Every structure is written in C-alpha cells, then in structure tokens.
Image: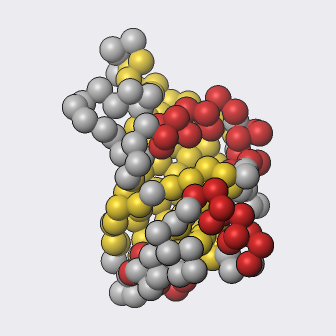
C-alpha cells in the first residue's frame, strides 16, 4: 500500500499538522539513507511540503541522491531545535523516495522553491511507510504515536 503525504494528511490530519509544524520550525533536518555497502549515511536536508507531497530536493550527484537512486529507503528526522524542550515533540518520517524527472512536475517545484540551480538538481517525492511522533505528556508520560499505512495511529504511553 502506497501513501503519499496528502493521503496520510487526509487519514490523520492532527498528526500530519503536528509533523508539518515540526519540520517547518527549522530549515535543516537529518536524512538517513543507505550506502552501497548497506551501512547508514546521515546528511543535512531541507524538505518541502507542496501540492500534497513531501519533497526532497538535492544537489546534482550528491551522495544522498545516489544512495536513493540505488535504494529508495530513507528516514527523515526533524531538527530537534535548541535546548531540550523539543516543542511539539520529536518526529520522523520513513519511506521510499521516488525520483521525479517529469519536466512539468520539476518546473512546478522549481517555480515554488527556486533551487540554487534550477537546471541541475535531483527531485524525489516520498511514499510513506511510517510516521512517528514522540513527546512528553503531563511531565509524566513518554507518548509514542506510530502510524503505518492501513493501520491508523497507535498511541503508547510509558511512565
């Protein structure tokens, strides 16, 4: 089952709004991909929520883009921000990144985002396999909200 951002946001609007707000609070986030040998690679990343999709745009031939071309699995962790409060909680999104080369789609993205070199970048749309939010509730509970396609949000509270 494939879920793009709009389908997730329609199914789980509260969690989607929280996740978008957390990613919107800071510019740079952390993307994890898989290297040729299967070991993890983490790199800084800017993300965009546009036209019902979560987009990943990358410099030409960047290692993260080459990783995703080879193996599309990724995890994206929102920047936790300064200090320890992590307002809104800690969020991450996992899935598959699908490279988009359709000239019309790339042009629409370029018009809205204005990348440094509009003629040379990799653009990936995401298919979600998991969305997770972890936060503290009532200064007592560690709350984990876990969403997977077809399963809805499962909430766990731990003391």
Q: Residue at x 76, y 48 (%)?
A: 7
Out of 117 and 14, give the one closest to the viewer: 117
Out of 107 and 10, give the one closest to the viewer: 107
Query: How far across and how far down the image is residue 48, in percent?
Result: 56, 53
Q: Tell me where residue 86 sits by quadrant.
A: top left
Q: Is residue 95 left or right of residue 36?
A: right
Q: Residue furthest left?
A: 83
User: Does 43 sit above or below residue 16?
Assistant: below
Q: Is residue 6 left or right of residue 43?
A: right
Query: How far across and how far down the image is residue 153, in percent?
Result: 64, 36
Q: Is residue 88 left or right of residue 153?
A: left
Q: Residue at x 64, y 56 (%)?
A: 112
Query: How far across and how far down the image is residue 70, in percent?
Result: 52, 85
Residue 37 appears anywhere in the view:
yes
Q: Tell me where residue 99 sits by quadrant.
A: bottom right
Q: Quadrant of the N terminus?
A: bottom right
Total residue callouts: 0
Q: Residue at x 34, y 66 (%)?
A: 43
Q: Residue furthest top?
A: 138
Residue 129 appears anywhere in the view:
no
Query: How far across and how far down the image is residue 9, in percent?
Result: 71, 41
Q: Quadrant of the C terminus?
A: top left
Out of 81 and 118, give the one closest to the viewer: 118
Which colouring convention does the figure follow? secondary structure
Q: Residue at x 38, y 27 (%)?
A: 87
């Amino acid at each position: 089952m494939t879920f793009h951002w709009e389908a997730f946001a329609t199914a789980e609007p509260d969690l989607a709004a929280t996740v978008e707000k957390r990613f919107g609070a800071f510019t740079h986030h952390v993307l994890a991909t898989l290297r040729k040998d299967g070991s993890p690679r983490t790199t800084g990343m800017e993300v965009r929520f546009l036209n019902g999709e979560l987009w990943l745009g990358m410099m030409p031939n960047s290692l993260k883009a080459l990783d995703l071309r080879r193996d599309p699995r990724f995890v994206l962790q929102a920047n936790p921000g300064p200090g320890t409060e992590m307002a809104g909680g800690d969020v991450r999104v996992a899935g598959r990144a699908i490279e988009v080369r359709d000239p019309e789609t790339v042009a629409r993205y370029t018009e809205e985002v204005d990348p440094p070199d509009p003629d040379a970048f990799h653009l990936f749309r995401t298919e979600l396999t998991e969305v997770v939010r972890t936060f503290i509730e009532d200064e007592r509970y560690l709350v984990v909200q876990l969403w997977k396609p077809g399963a809805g949000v499962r909430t766990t509270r731990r003391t």
